[in-house]
Image (cartoon, rainbow, N blue to C red):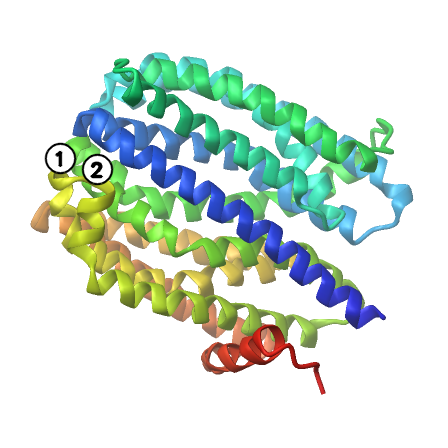
Amino acid sequence: MEQKDNKRYWLKSGLINITQNVSSQLLGVGSFLIMARLFSKADFGAWAIYLQAVTIFELLRSGIIGSALIKFIAGSDKKEHSKIFTASFVISGAITLACIAINLLFVDLFTDRLNAPQLKAVFYLFNIVYILSGIISQLCSVEQANLEYKGVFAVNFIRSLALFVYPLYCLLFNHPISLVELAYVQIVSMCLAATASWFFVKKFFTFKLVFNWEWVKKIFHYGKFSFGTSLSAQLSGTIDQWMLAGMLNTAASASFNTAIRITNLINIPTDTVAVIVFPQSAKRMHEEGKDAIKYLYEKSVGTILALLIPSVLFIYLFDEFIVTLIAGGKYADSVPILNVVLLYSLLIPFGRQFGTILDSIGKTNLTFWIVLITASTNLCLNFIFIKNFGVIGAAYATLIANVIGFAISQVILHRELKVNFLNSFIYAYMFYPEFINKYLRKKKDL
C-alpha cells in the first residue's frame, strides 16, 4: 500500500510539475518571440537583466525561508507547525523590508553601472511586486511541504500568462511596448496569483501565530547556507550576462540571454524533478536514512538525462533554424553561444540535484561552499574571457566553471553518500525500456 501511494505521489506530482513547467516555458517562449521582435536589442537586454535581478531579490528571501519551511514542516510533528510558520513569517517580513531599502538606495548606481538607465522606474515599481511575492512564497512553501503542487502551478501559470498577454496585445493592436507597463502588468498578475494560491492552500492553514525564538534561530541557521547556495547559483548563472552588459553593452547581454532562454526549454525535466525530490528526500532521510537518498539522487539524475540528451542533440542539429525561428534574424550571433551553453546544460542536472539532496540531509554548508567556489571561478573567468574573446568568451568561462563545480560536487557526494555518477547514466539507459514496459505496454511490475 505504501509503495502504491509512493508511486502515486511521483506520478501525480510529476504530471503537475511537468505541466507547470511546460506551460510556463511555452508562455515564456511566446512572450520571448514577441518581445524579441518588438523591443530593441538594448531594451530587451535591459529587461533580461531586470528579471535576473528580481530573481536574486527573491532568493534573498526564499533561499532562507523556502527550503527551511518545507523541510521542517514535512519532517516535524504537527504541534510544531505553528511555531515554524510564525518564525518563517517573521524572518520573511524582516528580509522584505531590508531588500526594499537596498533597492531604493542602490537602484541608481546599479542601473548606471549596467548601462540600463531605462530600468530605474521599473525597479521602483518592483517594491510592490516584492511584497506580494513574499506572501505567495510562504503559501507555496506550505503547500509543497504537504506534498501538493496545484497552487504552485496556478501561481506560475498566472504570472507567465500575464507576461505573454501584454506583449501579444501590443503586437495585435500596434501598441508601443513599454518596460514600465510590463512592471504594472507584473503587479496585477501577482495580486491574482496570491488570490489563487490562498484558494489552494487554505485547507492546510491550521496555523496560529506562536512566536518561538528557538525556531527563528533554527530556520535562520539552516536557511543561511541554503540562501547562500541559491544566491551563489543564481549569480553564477547571471554573472556572464551582467558582465557583458557592463563591459560591452545590453545588446551583447541580449544575445547571450537568447541562447540561455532556448536552453531553458530543455531544462524542464531538471526543474520538475528538483521540485518534487526535495520534500520527498527530506521525508526519506527522516524515515529511511542515507541509502535511500543515494538511490534517489542517482535515479532522479538518470531520469533527467534520459529526457535531456535527445533534446540537446536535436538543438545541435538545428541550431540556426531554432534561433531564427524563436528570436529572429538579428540574433544570429547567438548560435555559437548556444552550442557552448548546450554542453554545460548536461551538467546542470547533477548540480541541481546535488544541492537538493545535500540540503535535504542538512548539509547546506557544503552546498553553499561548492556553489560559491563555482560562482567565484565564473566571475574571474568571465572577466578574463570577455576581455579577450568578447561575447563567446562568457560562454566558455561558464562552461569551465561548471566543469570544475561538477568535479568537486561528485567527490563530495561519493564521500557523503557513496554516490557514483556513472550509475545515473545506467539509470538513463534503463529509463527507456522501463517507460515502454510500464506505460506503453502497460506491464505490471514483477
The residue nearer to you, when weighing 446 against 114, is 446
Q: Residue at x 52, y 15 (%)?
A: 128
User: In the rendered image, which residue does mark 1 sit on?
Assistant: 248
Tell whether label 2 touches label 1 (CB within 8 Å): yes
Residue drawn where x is 79% and y is 64% of the image: 5
Judging depth in this view, the residue of 64 and 436 nearest the camera is: 436
Q: Amino acid at mark 2?
A: Ser
Is residue 136 visible in the rendered structure shown here?
Answer: yes
Amino acid carrying label 1: it is Leu
Q: From the image, tell me which residue sits under label 2.
A: 253
Coordinates of residue 351 in the picture (x, y in percent): 45, 61
Q: Residue furthest left?
A: 388
User: In the rendered image, is residue 104 in sight?
Assistant: no
Task: Single out the residue that lies furthest toward the right.
Answer: 79
Determine whether 35 is above or below 398 in the image. above
- Kind of element beneath mark 2: helix
